[in-house]
Image (cartoon, helix red, strand yellow):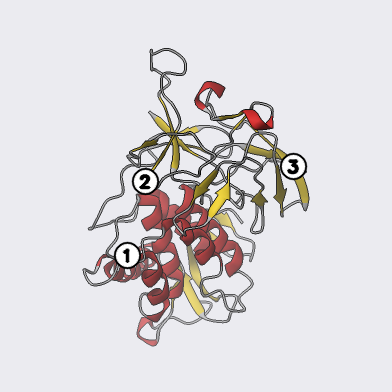
Amino acid sequence: MTVFYAVVEGDPLDSAKGSRVLGSCRSTIQGEDGVRRRMTLLGDGAWCDACKSAGEIVRGVDLPDRRRMRDMVSGGRHQAVDGDQVICKCERHPRIISVYGRKFTITYDRDDARAPGDITPHIYGKQPSAESNVPVATHDERFMLSDANGRLLRDTYTQRFGKPWVVSDDGLSFLATWESGILNGVNFQGHHVTDGFILKAYRDNVGIPTVGCGHRIVPSDHIQVGQTISLERARAFKKHDLERMERRLNNDVHVHVPLFQFEYDALVSIVYNCGPNLGADGIIRKINMGNYSGMFDFILTYRIGNNPGLPPRRYTEARLFASGVYDASH
């Protein structure tokens, strides 16, 4: 079974910060932030900030028209859903990430033998706007996702769950790609990377002595910049650093809302970058508000300061939290 989320004006694209879709439908959806936004239809426009062009929203996921809401006022056009694409000037047409319209879900089972139209798209929770005739139903928080190439990511989403959380293998690869540039080979700074570790100590882009997978060298490490450590020692540093970050997130008095696995993985990446003490306080306060849809915009600017390398990292962490896309390429 697959569950798709509706798209509304202001929802982002997976191409660049600042990319947004427009909405033209008279029906609105109230987001978790209390704001009502117009639903977006196929054929509406969107702005892609990566290529600085506007494009048309087209079908990008395997969801039949009979399962999409149809707006007769706009000539019978069907609604857009998360994963639909925008035909802009980018070589890879970006996909839409549903952030604000997640109260509207469409459940689709490709093996369902019932007659077409047997299941109706629905809104759950609060009453929809007066213009919408869509009935209220219950949302079970289960759905799947397609990646940037249209491949179905099976079992990506399950029900939100509570502690104890453990970072996933995908989360570890995502983190290593940001900390070391790539998983294997020579990164953009000329450092040799082995299994996500830079074994020769160096100074990061703000001058901090670093080694392994983003491990900040402290005096007790007895490592000098330019010195090479073993892969085993680099793994031990990462294990120790991760334990500190995960201990902060799993502490009973800190995060106390349920999370999807990818939401937790995004938080681990952020805390690994900012530190488990003061650096984690703001993100923990925000997630404890339970406003999941507000996290995308909050993460985008979280503790970026004047570090030019952080805005692109935060964008991919925000996208991971919002949609489960484990793409740390940069």
Residue 55, numbered label:
3
Q: Position of residue 75 (x, y in %)?
A: 69, 27
Name the residue type under label 1.
Answer: Lys
Q: Sequence-wise, which precedes: disc 3 or disc 1?
A: 3
The residue labelled by disc 1 is: 239
Q: Comparing marks 3 and 1, which lies closer to the viewer?
A: 3
Q: Secondary structure at mark 2?
A: loop
Q: Position of residue 132 (x, y in %)?
A: 51, 37
- Residue neighbourhood size for the residue with mark 3, other residues' Cα within 10 Å, grouped as few (<14), some (14–19), many (≥20): many
Residue drawn at (56%, 69%), measured in percent from left and top?
301
Q: 1 left or right of 176?
A: left
Q: Nearer the viewer, residue 31 or 218?
A: 31
Quarter location, residue 150? top right
C-alpha separation, residue under disc 1 versus residue under disc 2: 41 Å
Tell me: residue 57, above or below residue 172: above
Q: Position of residue 250 (x, y in %)?
A: 26, 65
Q: Nearer the viewer, residue 18 or 207?
A: 18
Q: Secondary structure at mark 1?
A: helix
Tell me: residue 282, above or below residue 27: below
Q: Position of residue 306 (x, y in %)?
A: 62, 79
* Quarter of the picture holding the N terminus: top left
Q: 73 left or right of 313?
A: right
Quarter location, residue 81? top right
Residue drawn at (62%, 30%), measured in percent from left and top?
59
The residue labelled by disc 2 is: 125
* Quarter of the picture holding the C terminus: bottom right
Q: Comparing marks 2 and 3, which lies closer to the viewer?
A: 2
